[in-house]
Image: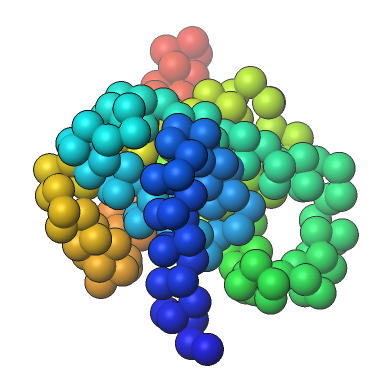
């Protein structure tokens, strides 16, 4: 069974859960999406946006955004706790041994560590819009004992923005909501490049502000 076929099966399973359980199903799926990256939020949220457009299951655009963010934050806390309690070496061993069951590799883990080391805590916000990274980046935050309140704040804002954009796309596209997943898959590298570019601009601006403050003090 190929990876693309597996993801298609997961996407169909996710759709059944959301349509059967409503907001509870959406929250559950978004929680699982953070601890099991192969579940694509690119398929979950646009479909929920379409259901909001059709006024089915009581879904609304803002409701989907809120529940999507709550589910994502809850899932992110699992990986934060994993990093906080186990540390880098133990997590690395776990990824090496059991990552294949989550379709994760040690290289994915190294990428998350590198992103956090390079861009700092701000990656918790921007990383929520990058596939794979959005899940694993919570681990280095836990390893670094990042302030939990700040972690939750960045995660909530980042996931809420991601949830809104994807559900809005589904709302606009209607029955063609599946095009969102196709577009993101096709232009995934562009999305990553844009996310990195925005992070770099943000970090540079913050460093300049800090240098300016230090200069004014002296």
Q: What residue appears at the point 28 percent right and 27 percent down from the top-left corner? A: 60
Seen from the viewer's position, the closer of residues 42 and 215 is 42
Q: What residue appears at the point 35 percent right and 56 percent down from the top-left corner? A: 43
Q: In the image, residue 145 lies at what x, y percent?
A: 75, 35
* In the displayed structure image, the side of residue 158 where residue 78 appears, left or right: right
What colouring does the structure picture have? rainbow
The image shows residue 198, relative to residue 131, as above or below, that is: above
Q: In the image, residue 8 lies at what x, y percent?
A: 41, 72
Q: What residue appears at the point 32 percent right and 27 percent down from the top-left corner? A: 58
Seen from the viewer's position, the closer of residues 134 and 10 is 10
* In the displayed structure image, the side of residue 143 where residue 196 appears, left or right: left
Extreme front residue here?
A: 20
Extreme bottom residue here?
A: 1
Q: How many marks?
A: 0
**Residue 215, quarter of picture:** top left
Q: What residue appears at the point 62 percent right and 41 percent down from the top-left corner? A: 75
Q: In the image, residue 163 lies at what x, y percent?
A: 36, 38
Extreme top residue here?
A: 217
* In the displayed structure image, the side of residue 28 where residue 80 appears, left or right: right
The image shows residue 218, relative to residue 150, as above or below, that is: above
Q: In the image, residue 53 lies at what x, y percent?
A: 18, 36
The image shows residue 138, relative to residue 106, as above or below, that is: above
Q: Is residue 106 visible?
A: no
Seen from the viewer's position, the closer of residues 2 and 99 is 2
**Residue 141, quarter of picture:** top right
* In the displayed structure image, the side of residue 89 where residue 78 appears, left or right: left
Q: Is residue 15 visible?
A: yes
């Amino acid at each position: 069974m190929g990876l693309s076929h597996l993801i298609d099966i997961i996407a169909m399973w996710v759709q059944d859960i959301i349509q059967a359980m409503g907001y509870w199903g959406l929250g559950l799926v978004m929680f699982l999406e953070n601890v099991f990256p192969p579940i694509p939020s690119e398929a979950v949220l646009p479909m929920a946006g379409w259901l909001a457009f059709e006024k089915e299951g009581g879904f609304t655009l803002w409701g989907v955004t809120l529940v999507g963010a709550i589910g994502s934050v809850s899932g992110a806390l699992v990986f934060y706790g994993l990093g906080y309690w186990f540390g880098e070496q133990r997590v690395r061993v776990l990824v090496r041994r059991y990552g294949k069951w989550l379709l994760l590799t040690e290289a994915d883990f190294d990428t998350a560590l590198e992103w956090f080391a390079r861009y700092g805590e701000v990656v918790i916000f921007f990383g929520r819009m990058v596939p794979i990274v959005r899940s694993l980046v919570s681990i280095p935050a836990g390893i670094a004992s990042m302030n939990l309140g700040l972690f939750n704040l960045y995660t909530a804002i980042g996931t809420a923005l991601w949830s809104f954009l994807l559900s809005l796309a589904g709302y606009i596209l209607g029955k063609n909501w599946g095009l969102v997943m196709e577009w993101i898959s096709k232009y995934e590298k562009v999305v990553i490049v844009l996310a990195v570019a925005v992070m770099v601009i943000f970090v540079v601006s913050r460093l300049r502000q800090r240098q300016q403050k230090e200069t004014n003090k002296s």
